[in-house]
């Protein structure tokens, strides 16, 4: 039964009974579940190292600011009929039948956020453009360190990966300028530019994913070293994270290539039929949102422990996938609790954000403020669950020999 159909039965006084039962069950799971210790470790790690929530917060707030800037830009550039709306105040009630689509539409984003714990926690755009520029100018020697790590790990293949990363970094820097030029081109030229921008967007997407994997590797190592009580400096951890990033690439490239070919490849093929086909709501609703995105999220959940296995152990991808299924089979009960708790938090936050958008709208002052609030809460929630996941993995694999740590 869809989520909206299951919860739409609760109305009037029954809603308070449902709310009370839900809160009671939540407290029981949080306080008596097998993952309560690792969840508490995640909170303490966030209090000790603010990067665990500051880095995700910087990413989510930057993306929210970018979306707002795009709305303002189109408000100034588009004709009156096509301008997005901006108002000081907008308030509307949700009709009785309006809860079901809100609840059902929140399931997929919550599952994707849950899957992001095992892949890429948050979108890195538009900061990926700045990160690409800093990488190209070899800021603090990061480019040189990346080259040494790739060459040591892959030799000749590492040189090819290094070149691909540089090309993707260039595309990430060019992406904001390419899309900003679209409204100023004529109809004939705009279609050609759209096709070019889709290629740039694809390469930029690869760099965004690689940057997200690198940052996630850093955050997982940060939480893990705190759990183990190891002393380290930020520079030591940064260098070690880049070296481990070269190992995680074995998992990152297949994931990024598969998702980008399914999403960006289909969009590029649709542009051959004109911009109307590319912007078609039917394609997005039934193919992208109805098939591609759910399949990718479920696949990432099935390989939930591959990334963290590669971070902590120098293994091949085949061995990491084998260990992933052994880990999930051996610790299915604790993993079920952890995944359920993470999904519940992401789903609740997504529903609250959807309700705020529905009531206040995305172009009103309260709606904009609530979007920033949602971004900060999502960052804090993601950092907490990521640190808790590192603690849980450490507790469930106490006798595993680990790669040399800083």
Image (cartoon, grey):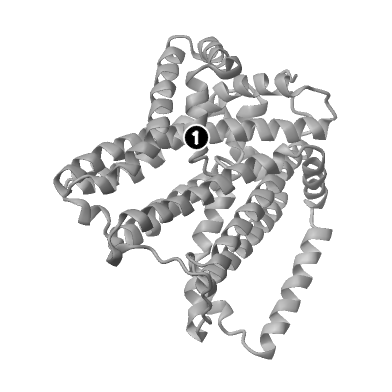
- Residue 146 image point, x, y percent: 54, 17
* Residue 321 visible to an observer of this rendering: no
Q: Residue furthest bottom?
A: 13
153 shown above or below 127: above
Residue drawn at (51%, 57%) of the image? 109
Judge from the rendering whether residue 1 lies leftward or rightward of residue 236; answer left or right. left
Q: Please identify the quarter of the rendering in which residue 244 is found.
A: top right
The residue lying toward the viewer, choosing from 366 and 237, is 366
User: What is the crowding at mark 1: few (fewer than 14 residues within 10 Å), some, or many (at least 20)?
Assistant: many
Q: Residue furthest left?
A: 188
Q: Secondary structure at mark 1?
A: helix
* Residue 152 visible to an observer of this rendering: yes
Judge from the rendering whether residue 66 lies leftward or rightward of residue 268; answer left or right. right
123 shown above or below 88: above
Residue drawn at (30%, 63%) of the image? 82
Residue drawn at (46%, 37%) of the image? 255
The residue lying toward the viewer, choosing from 260 and 370, is 370
- Residue 202 image point, x, y percent: 36, 37
- Residue 134 image point, x, y percent: 52, 24
> Which quadrant, please, contains the C terminus?
top right
Judge from the rendering whether residue 97 lies leftward or rightward of residue 240; answer left or right. left
Count of picture labels? 1
- Residue 214 image point, x, y percent: 58, 30
Residue drawn at (59%, 41%) of the image? 118
Q: Which residue position is annotated with label 1?
A: 128
364 shown above or below 188: below
């Amino acid at each position: 039964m869809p989520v909206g159909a299951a919860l739409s039965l609760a109305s009037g006084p029954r809603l308070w009974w449902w709310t009370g039962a839900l809160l009671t069950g939540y407290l029981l799971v949080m306080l008596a579940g097998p993952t309560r210790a690792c969840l508490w470790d995640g909170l303490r790690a966030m209090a000790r190292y603010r990067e665990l929530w500051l880095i995700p917060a910087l990413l989510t707030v930057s993306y929210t600011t970018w979306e707002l800037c795009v709305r303002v830009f189109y408000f100034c550039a588009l004709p009156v009929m096509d301008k997005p709306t901006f108002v000081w105040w907008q308030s509307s009630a949700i009709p009785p039948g309006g809860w079901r689509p809100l609840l059902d539409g929140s399931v997929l984003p919550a599952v994707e956020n849950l899957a992001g714990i095992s892949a890429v926690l948050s979108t890195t755009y538009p900061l990926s453009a700045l990160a690409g520029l800093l990488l190209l100018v070899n800021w603090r020697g990061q480019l040189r360190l990346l080259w040494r790590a790739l060459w040591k790990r892959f030799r000749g293949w590492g040189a090819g990966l290094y070149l691909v990363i540089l090309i993707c970094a260039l595309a990430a820097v060019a992406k904001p300028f390419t899309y900003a030029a679209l409204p100023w081109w004529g109809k004939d030229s705009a279609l050609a530019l759209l096709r070019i921008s889709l290629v740039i967007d694809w390469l930029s997407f690869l760099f965004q994913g690689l940057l997200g994997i690198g940052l996630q590797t850093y955050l997982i190592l940060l939480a893990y070293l705190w759990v183990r009580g190891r002393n380290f400096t930020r520079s030591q951890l940064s260098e070690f994270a880049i070296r481990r990033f070269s190992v995680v690439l074995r998992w990152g490239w297949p994931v990024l290539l598969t998702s980008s070919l399914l999403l960006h490849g289909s969009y590029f093929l649709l542009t051959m039929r004109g911009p109307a086909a590319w912007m078609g709501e039917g394609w997005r609703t039934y193919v992208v949102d109805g098939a591609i995105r759910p399949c990718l999220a479920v696949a990432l959940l099935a390989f939930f422990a591959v990334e963290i296995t590669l971070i902590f152990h120098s293994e091949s991808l085949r061995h990491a996938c084998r260990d992933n299924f052994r880990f999930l089979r051996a610790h299915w009960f604790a993993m079920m609790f952890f995944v359920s708790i993470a999904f519940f938090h992401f789903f609740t936050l997504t529903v609250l954000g959807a309700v705020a958008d529905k009531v206040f709208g995305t172009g009103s002052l309260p709606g904009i403020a609530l979007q920033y609030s949602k971004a900060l809460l999502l960052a804090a929630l993601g950092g907490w669950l990521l640190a808790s996941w590192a603690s849980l993995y450490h507790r469930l694999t106490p006798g595993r020999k680990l790669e040399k740590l800083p």
